[in-house]
Image (cartoon, grey):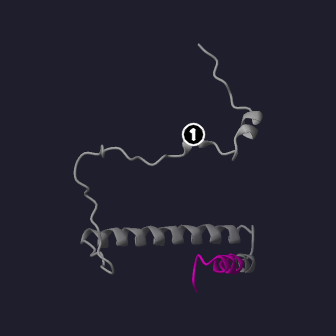
Amino acid sequence: MAKTKKPSPEDDKNRRSGLDRRWIIAPHDGPERRSGKDRRKALEEGSLVATEESDQSEISTIQDLLMANSMQLDAIAQILIEKGIFSKDELFNMLKRIQREYQKTGNIED
């Protein structure tokens, strides 16, 4: 089996930009090789996408998951408070601090 040459730092210095060009995709000017019709639906400017009936069951499932997650987190917090790992005040202070951090980054709105 032939040994493959590993790129060395010297080779990187010899490149003008130092950029590894092996992963750059060049534009293709040849004939189209994809077969079949483009099945993506183009939306007109300003048009809305109508929801289907199946989306309602999916939304309720997501709401059920969120509710179950909230109940589990509440149960864990109550157990930790009962065991004396931390107090309610420490929990609320931490929640307020995290909420402020999220508001700074713009991830949630209050």
**Camera-side residue of 76 and 66:** 66
Side of 27 relative to 18 (left or right): left
Q: Is residue 109 magenta?
A: yes
Q: Quadrant of residue 41?
A: bottom left
Could you tell whether 61 is left or right of 22 in the image? Answer: left
- Nearer the observer, 96 or 44: 44
Q: Nearer the viewer, residue 6 or 90?
A: 6
Q: Which residue is mark 1?
A: 22
Main SS class of the magenta portion in the image: helix
Residue for point 59% across, 75% down: 107
Disc 1 residue type (three-letter): Arg
Residue at the bottom extreme of this rendering: 110
Magenta-tinted stretch = 95-110
Mark 1 Cα shell of 10 Å, populated few (<14), some (14-19), many (≥20): few
Q: Which quarter of the picture shows residue 53? A: bottom left
Coordinates of residue 4 in the picture (x, y in percent): 63, 22
